[in-house]
Amino acid sequence: MDDVDLKRKKILIVDDEPDLLEIISSEFDLLDSIVFQADSIEKAIQILNSHSIDVVISDVRLPHKTGIDLLKFIKNKNPIHPPVILMSGYTDASIQEIYNLGAEGFLAKPFRLEELILTTSRLLKTEDLNVDLFQDDKLIEIALNFNFNLIEAIEKKAFSIGRGGCSFLIPYQTEIPLNQNEFVFSIQFQNIILKGSGWARWSEHDSKTNSIKIGLEFHKLDSESHKIIKEYINRHTMIPYIPHLK
């Protein structure tokens, strides 16, 4: 599926830096989006309460309250809509926390405007899980095998599923490209195999098991994997977009 046309889409941009607010707004204006601006959480909430916003783009560091506070406000009302993209040039919150709290996107400042536009367009797709169907004809780059079924893996905190991705433990020596490079994966359990492609949005060392925790955002899933993930999400109320294994 091609990226979504942003024409007439209602975009709320929240940032207390006037220059950056104008630069981002101008970029979406050029795409004929309907742009709303806010320089504080309070103004952002007023706009959200008055308009049906399609996507929120917010800085994390704001006066009085933070973009994290805005994210929690939005996701407590509706975990799915509108999608939220957070931006930050600081370490106010970890990437793991941001995705676990329900943000659908995160960009570290400075970033390319093209990257923001592509992320916004991708998140506005209308398909379930915001993923395309994966054609099973590509070379598997990352193959993982669990010695138990999917539910057991989740119960053992070796695997977790979110609205837009998953997290899992891998051996310490495993190499996975972070963030920019999409890769093809196969995750095999005793009862099912999940296949698709995506991005590793974060990684961290687990000292207890000497393993690596990976947060994977789905881009494409094969039809069977799509069905499995969709059924699991429908059975569980969840806010995390990419869950954080704890």
Image (tube, rainbow, N blue to C red):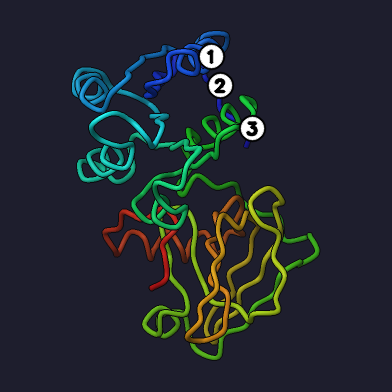
Amino acid type, residue under disc 2 in the picture: Asp
Tag 3 residue? 2
Amino acid type, residue under disc 1 in the picture: Ile
Secondary element at tag 1: helix
Q: Quadrant of the C terminus?
A: bottom left
Tag 2 residue? 5
Above or below, 239 relative to 187: above
Q: Quadrant of residue 83?
A: top left
Query: Residue 104 in the image: x percent, y percent?
Result: 44, 44
Query: Residue 164 in the image: x percent, y percent?
Result: 46, 53
Query: Residue 46 in the image: x percent, y percent?
Result: 19, 20
Q: How far is mark 2 from mark 3, CA to CA?
A: 9 Å
Q: Quadrant of residue 86?
A: top left
Above or below, 161 relative to 72: below
User: Which residue is more in the foreground, 238 or 17?
Assistant: 17
Tag 1 residue? 23
Res 12 seen here: no
User: Which residue is more in the foreground, 210 or 72?
Assistant: 210
Between discs 3 and 1, the one toward the N terminus: 3
| Residue at 37% from the left image edge and 35% from the top image edge | 61
Q: Residue furthest bottom?
A: 147
Q: Quick check: 166 left or right of 136? A: left
